[in-house]
Amino acid sequence: MLAQMQPTFILPAWPVVGHEWAVALLARSAATEQVRHAYLFTGPAQVGKTTLARAFAQTLNCQASSEKRPCGLCDSCQRMARDAHPDARLIEPQGKSGRELLIDQVRGIIHEAALSPLLGRRKVFIVREVDRGNAPAMNALLKTLEEPPPSVVLLLTSSYPERLLPTIVSRCQVLSLRPVAVHQIEEMLRAHGAAEERAQLLARLANGRPGWALTALTDESVWQSRQEWLDNLNHLLGQGRNERLAYAERMAARAQEAPEMLALWASWWRDLLLWQQGCPEVVTHIDRRETLASQASRLSPDQVRRFLMALGSASRYLEQNVNPRLVCESLLLHLPRWEAQPA
Amino acid sequence: MASQALYRTWRAQTFSEIVGQEHVTRTLQNALRAGRMAHAYLFSGPRGTGQTSTARILAKAINCLAEDISARPDNSCPICIAINEGRLLDLIEIDAASNRGIDEIRDLRDKVRFAPAEARYKVYVIDEVHMLTNEAFNALLKTLEEPPSHVIFVLATTDPQRVPATVLSRCQRCDFRRICQRDTVAHLERILKSLNKEAESAALDEIARAATGSLRDAISLLDQLLASGQERLTLDQVHDVLGLVADEAVQELVEHLGKHETAKGLALINRFAEEGADLRQFARQIVGYLRGVLLLKVGDGDALLRLPAEMIAVMRRQAHHWSAPDLVRAVRLFNQAANDLRLNFQAQLPLELAFIEATLPTETVAPAARAPEEPAPRGTPARPPASETRPQPASAPPALPAQRPAPTSDVAAQPVPQQIAPVAKNPTDETLLGQAMEKWKTILIEVRNQSRPAEGYLRSSRGPLSVEDSVLVIGFRNQFAKDSMEDPKQKAVVEAVVSRVLGKETRVRCQMLAANDLLASQPVKHAPVVTPPASPPPPPEPPEPIERVLGRFAQERGGQVKPMPPAQGNG
């Protein structure tokens, strides 16, 4: 279903993995001078929103001839890649501990938007994680977002578009990026010099997020914690309540990592689920097939389903700021246990 | 070189171009004709329904120089042209969201007094007015109440609830409505025609649906799609950009669902995920489709569904796979999945879970006749607890068995155990008892309306136990609840309600249940997830020592707790 957009137009190679339809659309509108004043890129974290936005910004100001944009070689592209272009601003949430987009930042945008570009053809603002904007900031953006001065292009990114004001969303061209196909991430990883097996596994673990896969490839600790977390999970299955509560305490002490660990566990239990339901070909953890097979046969489908639900609510509670230790304890008490009950 | 977004080039310029808001435009035009303009208007409504556009048109119409009043705005006189080009000094458009402080409003208040420069009226359009600070609103009040005669205020907002009542009452309010799908499609067709492009009508339908009543959303989406440069806009393109899957694919998935082909269904979901479908949209599509099937199942759905005949035929056939309650359950499950998918966590998982759960047979999940006092499931399709050990919320971790064998807070949710069947001695009492049990829920609701505490006590009771000579006996497990219920005031409330519901003068007596009854009703439902309670609970015995109850309960829960000292052996 993705192949319909290309025919009349040959895509230049954008430094973006996947999202062909979005690239086609943006490249086409840049080539035909049909660029709109505001775009909103949505999609899971690390799926490539900012990468795409930056590539588009490069295209808009690239000095090469139009079919080669973005060339990546000209002065403009180079500066852009270093975030040092005077006509391109990357705005990230600041505020307390870098978690909030402030009204002063937005006022800065409004002010700068009124100036004409210095070097390039357009002034581009890439505003990351707009959903972090507090209410005044978001509202302050509205009018500029609706009718900015000519030559201004606003590129917003957000992982949680439902947290945005609907009035913001409706003023933008929304490009909602979906997870990237596994084989594309695999190719990308191979191009970055990953070994075949590692590429296959990471591509699956990445959950459609090329950014994550790249980090995992270069950062050994991601890999190690994956191994450790899975081993822990399997170990806990055979343990009693004392062990589990002790582990929950350790988990809670490293609460920042907990969401990621829960996601990993969920992927493992999802594998069990798929295995039991007769879809072993789509499992994620392809390097641990034997463990999967044996666990899948020892657990009942009902147990797997329930624990998955427990995992789901646990991560929801964490997001809602429930005491992490309570969440972990409750979760681990719901974890099925190997031994049959003593009579 | 800058080309404007379609929604800006297509901003309505006359009243007749405003789509779907006849109730507003007619009012305004009549007021213009009669020369009875209010001095302040509040335009409210969902995004993209035309508030700002109407405000500008109004400014033009009031100041237009055309002779014929009904032809205003004519968009050709100097004033209209100046407004269209955004250079009329007397149209002051204020972005209240970025100028929200009291200083800006003071400034405005000072300038309001000056006469207009060239037009008849000075028009102040205050957009996003809900973002003004409280002080700013209050500073505006006096001006808004009695502005100079040459000033008209138009406040526009998407969020009128946040505008203080004192401001609301000083304005004439116009509520803009969502624009219906037919109007949206017609407008999109007009735009396409002027651009010399074509589109499949199904594609436009899909755009209008995705826009959910906001014209700006619809036009933006069209704009985006047209950027792909093809001559003819196809449904596939729309699906591509929105991440939707073809209707046939949804149909196929529902087919698997109906036939309980779990493996095939899961494979299908994974294929779509791999192909880059937006799974949340997919879940919504499934919900939409199942809704169609449901409508066909329960009656005459054809009229409600704007779908091709062959699709309806397939839906009608698929409707036979399910009973209506099963369908409702499936709709709920997928709806929940669509909500859960918002968490960026294991993209396909919620959808897969919903699919698997929807294929589970109903008998194991939703016993039809449950105890009357069972609380109604909340929000999510939670199934009755007796068969479903849904994970406990983390905020309420399961009570540790060693502390409290029978948490009283749980009592209300428990089904009436079969061991103590309600009894009645004579036939009249028997019918009365039957009625009381049947209508217990109604009674609870009625009591709730009169006395919340009484309802609470009743909910923690075990419901009607027996009827003796027109006295309804209610069984309690909890001394406190029983004592509280016996308070004459509460009792009177309950008796009145019971008599009214049963249509017969009935008195109420409260009774404590014997200890062995209590044991019999030990919770079975909170069995550990690990082992569904395969072995039946031990037969009720004469009063057991509490230590034994405790030990047994502990075992049921986790199996690994040390017996309480002194060890009493295990039950």
Image (cartoon, coloured by chain):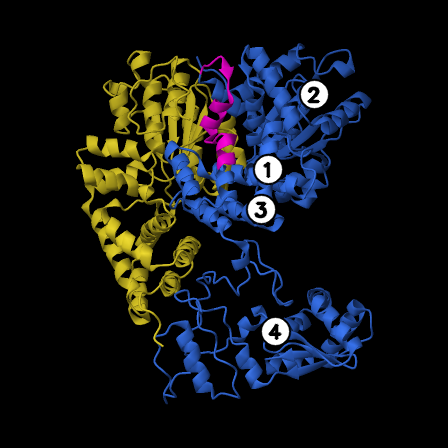
Chain colours: A yellow, B blue
Residue A334 is situated, as x and y percent measured from the top left of the image, at 39, 63
Q: Which residues are magenta?
A: B229-252
Mark nearer the N terminus (4 vs 2): 2
Residue B248 is a magenta residue = yes
Residue A93 is situated, as x and y percent measured from the top left of the image, at 38, 40
The residue singled out by tag 3 in the image is: B322
What is the quadrant of the C terminus of chain B in the image? Answer: bottom left
Q: Are marks 3 and 1 on the same chain?
A: yes
Q: Chain letter of disc 3?
A: B
The residue singled out by tag 1 in the image is: B317
Q: Marks 1 and 2: which is nearer the front?
A: 1
Q: Amino acid at mark 1?
A: Arg
The residue singled out by tag 2 in the image is: B15
User: Is residue A50 rendered to the left or right of residue B409?
Assistant: left
Mark nearer the N terminus (4 vs 1): 1
Q: Are marks 4 and 2 on the same chain?
A: yes
Q: Which mark is residue B194?
A: none
Mark nearer the N terminus (3 vs 2): 2
Mark nearer the N terminus (3 vs 1): 1
Residue A332 is situated, as x and y percent measured from the top left of the image, at 35, 63
Residue A12 is a magenta residue = no
* Most foreground residue, A251 or A293: A293
The residue singled out by tag 4 in the image is: B460
Question: Circle 4: is it few (<14), some (14-19), or many (20+) Cα within 10 Å?
Answer: many
Q: Are marks 1 and 2 on the same chain?
A: yes
